[in-house]
Image (cartoon, rainbow, N blue to C red):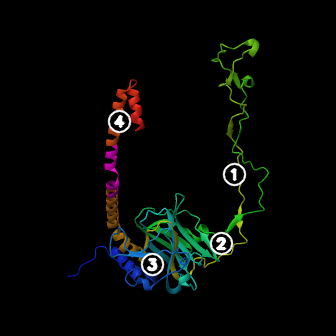
Amino acid sequence: MAIRARHPNVLSLVLISFLSIASAKVFFEERFEDGWESRWVKSEWKKDENLAGEWNYTSGQWNGDANDKGIQTSEDYRFYAISAEFPEFTNKDNTLVFQFSVKHEQKLDCGGGYLKLLSGDVDQKKFGGDTPYSIMFGPDICGYSTKKVHAILTYNDTNQLIKKDVPCETDQLTHVYTFIIRPDATYSILIDNVEKQTGSLYTDWNLLPAKKIKDPEAKKPEDWDDKEFIPDPEDKKPEGYDDIPKEIPDSDAKKPEDWDDEEDGEWTAPTIANPEYKGPWKPKKIKNPNYSGKWKAPLIDNPDFKDDPDLYVFKLKYVGIELWQVKSGTLFDNVVITDDPEYAKQLAEETWGKQKDAEKAAFDEAEKKKEEEESKDDPVDSDAEEDDEDTDDADDAESKTEAAEDSDESSKEEVHDEL
């Protein structure tokens, strides 16, 4: 018997979505499973200075799946640099999606959690902070002032930071960061599959000169009135206003009893501010009926602007992690570079999405155990011993003060306070 589908449109959408994911181009994907070390090259940058940090292969102290491992920084006050190569490609005429997950188990106070995409030929053994890159993306935290998502694009050999503020996550759980660049030069930044920022490469980075500029030849018209408020011509100064003194004698002041007029001169009361004095008179303000608004120079085409239809295009060959950490414990996983936002979204749901609740529960349990251990380490017993010693000392002090002739309650309290 044939079964009729009740929601053909829904089924069609599901089928289209499946076909879209199936046709996605995945230029690079790393879930850090067996054999990951053969795909990644650990840099020797900072090794001579004994400042090169080591990576741990781990799922972390708390996780949603102990078998889902990534790489984690393991040493404090260290530089970290590691990279992987993939077949070179360009995103011309295609969407570029760059995504990864990161977890700061150490409650990061200063350090990065970003990745880089690089072009050309790179000596991966020397990959470091001075190595040119095309895109740098991910969270950066340092103190109270820096808690943002970096989105840096290199154009004409200059690194340009995004002008918009994109706050990053600051807890100790895994989060997924996604950067999407489209052929129409628009972009989106997502955290945990939720869009946090969107806009245009033209306006949100200083990649090109502005399309429009203020006309340098424009002048404000002479009859342009930009005063929003003017003095009320009908307002008049009250009679006697100028006769009100700024200060008056203090009526509560009394002549000192030891004042000698012959020696000290005639006594006069000191002055105080006069509450009736309102300052120099000014007429009240009213709306200016001739107000023309704030004058602005009109915008004209910028003669220095030259459009670049390939503004969004990058030629990429490597992905790398290069960062400095004061406190280690940042764990990276599930890196993907593709042309399909839906593929990246599904990858996030298959990994972070399925594990986030279990990870949160594991974190809460770890925090609970930590608090219990800390309470065990608290000097409760020693506090009790100190209380006993205080009691003994107080008893001794009390017996001594009782034997003294001048003992009273205040002296006992003084002895107790000193103890």
On the image, which quarter does residue 157 sit in?
bottom right
Mark in front: 4 vs 2:
4
Q: Quadrant of the C terminus?
A: top left
If you read the primary sequence from the N terminus, does the residue marked by circle 1 or circle 3 appear first? 1
Mark in front: 2 vs 1:
2
The residue under the point 65% across, 13% down is 257
Residue 294 location (% of width, % of height): 69, 51
Mark in front: 1 vs 3:
3
Q: Is residue 176 above or below residue 218?
A: below
Task: Say which mark, if any, is on residue 208.
Answer: 2
Direction from residue 191 to residue 126 in the image, left or right = right
Return the residue at label 1. Answer: 294
SS under mark 1? loop
The residue under the point 45% across, 85% down is 39
SS under mark 2? loop
On the image, which quarter does residue 271 sit in?
top right
Return the residue at label 3. Answer: 336
How far apart are the alpha carbons under marks 1 and 3?
50 Å
Given contact means CB atoms under 8 Å apart, are the residues at marks 4 and 2 in contact?
Answer: no
Direction from residue 285 to residue 319 in the image, left or right = left
Q: Looking at the picture, which amino acid does disc 1 mark?
A: Lys
Residue 249 location (% of width, % of height): 69, 20
How far apart are the alpha carbons under marks 4 and 2?
79 Å
Task: Say which mark, if any, is on residue 394.
Answer: 4
